[in-house]
Image: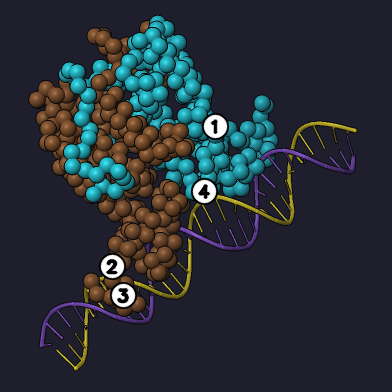
Chain colours: A cyan, B brown, C purple, D yellow
Amino acid sequence: MTEQTAYHHGNLREELVAAALEMIQESGGAYGVTLRKIASRVGVSHAAPYRHFQDKKDLLAAVARQGFDLLMDWTRKRLSETDGEPLSRFGAWGMAYMDFAIAHPAHFRVMFAPPEKGMTLSEDLRPESSQYFKEFQDLVSDCHDKGVLVGEDPASITRAAWSMVHGFSTLFIGNHMETTGLDFQAVTHMKRSILTTFYRGTRPDGEGLPYRRTAGKKESEKENP
Amino acid sequence: MTEQTAYHHGNLREELVAAALEMIQESGGAYGVTLRKIASRVGVSHAAPYRHFQDKKDLLAAVARQGFDLLMDWTRKRLSETDGEPLSRFGAWGMAYMDFAIAHPAHFRVMFAPPEKGMTLSEDLRPESSQYFKEFQDLVSDCHDKGVLVGEDPASITRAAWSMVHGFSTLFIGNHMETTGLDFQAVTHMKRSILTTFYRGTRPDGEGLPYRRTAGKKESEKENP
DNA sequence: GTTCGTTGTTGACACTGGAAACATTCCTGC
DNA sequence: GCAGGAATGTTTCCAGTGTCAACAACGAAC
């Protein structure tokens, strides 16, 4: 851990990841960041990163991995601050997800960046197969078992909850939420109303939501007409 | 519309947009597609596109614009197939959104691709300021006025609904939904359960969802600890 | 103190987006 | 008909990119 010579950098790998993250933050997007600029920011030649990463994707993947670890810690911390009731934990989970995305948009974007050309996303970068999501699913199941979350089956509730907070996070950090001149309180209100709507629903009484087409063909919805 | 000479292509602009879309579909992502390959696929030199588009972003923006137009038509068609009741139209809107994303993932991805470096997204590419969303907001307000959608204020319901279907769409086409070996019926079930959950909520009785932290500091949630 | 594996550098390569200069075709006014 | 722009496409060039191979400096082990 001591200071290294000018030639051997010491902990180049981590500094490359950090620099990459910085540059993504600055340019607001993973694309546009170039490997050569990352290297030069750390003060190293343009081919040095290849001693630590297989290629550019591999570096970005490291950033994403770091992001998932951060999200895990972030969420655990929030859950530990609740009163421990399953429903409280469920609410805290949703709030933590949105807060994380807003607090760390660069990480969040890289984490959910669409996979590139040929490559299938490496398994540890698929949130739905991670420990993080297993724990969330268990949490929802727990709530369902105890009768504090009802309606659909646990898997569907999990999907819906994730969709809700993920959609909000994505749209918010993508600047699609009329975020001009929005103060802290307004954002808090938005997040809370998202969770409230999820929990309370929007129907006044018994019936389900109609979504069926009266005149459409149903056999294949691949094509609209 | 007649056949043109070999030199003057005829309708190069549209063919470029079409070729770009094809290549995005094939590589499953807007990045990786190169202007030169697009040009060569259409059978034209690599600088020809610059007669019709300012730069690469401009071409992609044209694809996005086309996508929004498609979404608009798609949605209108679906709405017209309902019985006309506000709530039916609301349900149809949500279903149409998810169906569109799944049927046209390449378009959808480009439409909601994060904006590049310096550029602020041109106004007609911001869905939240488009005619499409004005109409959706009006639809929600109508439902709210008639008492068939209750709970939060119309703006919040709009936000929540959009978040829900957008999140599902994003996660689904990003292959985060354990989509392996999923048949048509299973997908239909997923979409319906999303809408049902939105409408009915998940609570068993009166109270709201707890989301407050018991021990956290609230003044600034920018940093987790 | 030599040797060897690790880490960093230099130089090359094919490819990219973009600009400038040139070529071909279309359209319009006479 | 036919000149002469205005469009549209092509060629040529450039800086910058990701990646690789060959080389150089360092640290540790015998």
Q: Mark 3: which amino acid?
A: His
Q: CA distance from mark 1 to mark 4?
A: 17 Å
Q: Percent x, y for residue B58?
A: 32, 55
Specify whether disc 4 shares its chain with disc 3. Answer: no
- In the image: residue C9, left or right of residue C24: right
Q: CA distance from mark 3 to mark 2?
A: 9 Å
Q: Chain of mark 3?
A: B
Q: CA distance from mark 3 to mark 1?
A: 51 Å
Classify mark 2: helix, strand or loop.
loop
Residue position for label 1: A124
Residue at position x 66%, y 26% in the image: A1
Residue position for label 4: A118
Mark 1 or mark 4: which comes first in sequence? 4
Is B121 above or below relative to A88?
Answer: below
Q: Chain of mark 1?
A: A
Q: Chain of mark 2?
A: B
Q: Mark 1: which amino acid?
A: Asp
Is A200 above or below relative to A37?
Answer: above
Q: Percent x, y for residue B124?
A: 22, 47
Residue position for label 3: B8
Specify whether disc 1 shares its chain with disc 4. Answer: yes
Residue position for label 2: B11
Q: Mark 4: which amino acid?
A: Gly
Whether residue B183 is visible, yes or no, is yes
